[in-house]
Amino acid sequence: MAATTVAFITFLCIEIGGMTVSGGKVYLAGTVATGAKTVGKDVVQTSDGFVAEIDPATGQTVWSRQYAGRNGVAGPAGIAVSAQGSSPLDKLGLPSGKVDFTASNQIVASTSARPGDEFYVRQGQTGAAKLITIAANDTYKTLATKISRALGFQVKVETITVSGATQLQIKPLNNRAPIELQAGPVGRDALAALGISEGLVTSDAVTAKATAPGAQKAGAIAATNKLKAYYALAMSSGLNLSSANDVKQTQAALQLALSTVRTIFGDMTTPPATDTSGKNAPPKYLTDQIAQYQAALNRLTAGQ
């Protein structure tokens, strides 16, 4: 084999740059001297690249191809052989083999979130906001762990499957520690990409006061109202007036928030329908708050 290769190099004036063996066949790549040319004051040796298949038993060339290089110089340094040969897939840049239809569980593969996207979580109304950053290999399970750790494991975060899609479910462990979700920077907000809205997460946000105080006593008349434990204005921190479309979105958000304020005021001021005893009048501090809300509402609607 070695003697055959030396003879091959001697007769063809070539230089071997790479060799590989596949299926009992030998393949070579290298350069073939083609002459010389003058570049300025220098004389540059020119060469073409080549690939060839050699019969290892006889040393004969089975086939060969020669390729011109840029500026008359080519210098292949290696060669690789595929047992499956070439196909249209190679031109399209696609690999050959079985197609894996298994869905990826990574967040960046199943949502529009990208590595480096961010959002904030905060426990209670006075706690510090904690930054959550999406990593390239994050899944919903690892994201749930990040959120739990950031909030001192005082929140229940788990993944659920709805209609075949994985979702994140966040629940406070108690009513005294609501969770606030805040959007990340403009252009890197992960909440929107995950399909999560900014807001307050609490276990009793929609729990109404079902009965008036004292209604469970003998002879008391049950009374209901629509007052909730928490309300949210759904005002995004990314609102701006940079363009006509942004102005329209801001106006729509303000109108929705104003409607929510009206709902809050109505829920706070509408007495239970069946409470006629007069013993369940709201305390003075609550009526003072209602008066302040009424004054604020009057100012907001003054220009309409």
Image (tube, grey):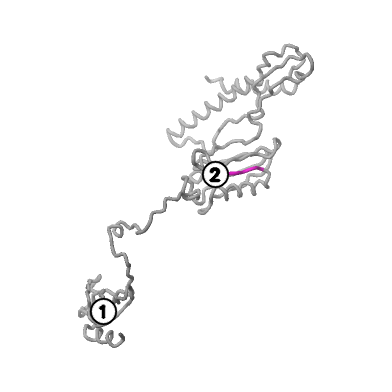
Residue at image coords 52%, 48%:
117
Whether pointer 2 and pointer 1 mark residues with C-beta atoms closer than 8 Å, the reply is: no
Element at label 1: loop
> Measuring 56% from the left and 28% from the top, which residue is drawn there?
257
User: Which stretch did the figure color magenta?
Assistant: 155-160
Q: Position of residue 68 (x, y in %)?
A: 22, 71
| Alpha carbon distance from label 2 to label 1 | 65 Å
Q: Residues within 10 Å of mark 1 (few under 14, many from 20)?
A: some
Q: Residue furthest bottom?
A: 3
Residue 116 image label: none
- Label 2 sits on a secondary structure element that is loop
Answer with mark 2 or mark 1, whichever residue precedes in sequence: 1
Image position of 55 with respect to 241: above or below: below
Q: Is residue 269 left or right of residue 6?
A: right
Where does residue 240 sit, x and y in percent of width and height? Answer: 50, 36
Label 2 amino acid? Answer: Gly
Q: Name the foreground residue: 99 vs 131.
A: 99
Residue 101 screen position, x and y as percent: 42, 50
The residue shown at (29%, 88%) is: 3
Residue hosting label 1: 55
Q: Is residue 100 above or below residue 242?
A: below
* Mark 2 surroundings within 10 Å by alpha-carbon count, few (fewer than 14), some (14 through 19), many (20 or more): many
Q: Main secondary structure of the magenta part?
A: strand
Tell me which corner region of the image, top left, top right, bottom left or bottom right, holds residue 282: top right
Q: Is residue 197 above or below residue 70?
A: above
Q: Is residue 261 left or right of 215 when viewed as pictured?
A: left
Residue assigned mark 2: 184
> Residue farthest to the top?
276
Image quarter (top left, top right, bottom left or bottom right) of the N terminus: bottom left
Which marked residue is nearer to the observer: mark 2 or mark 1? 1
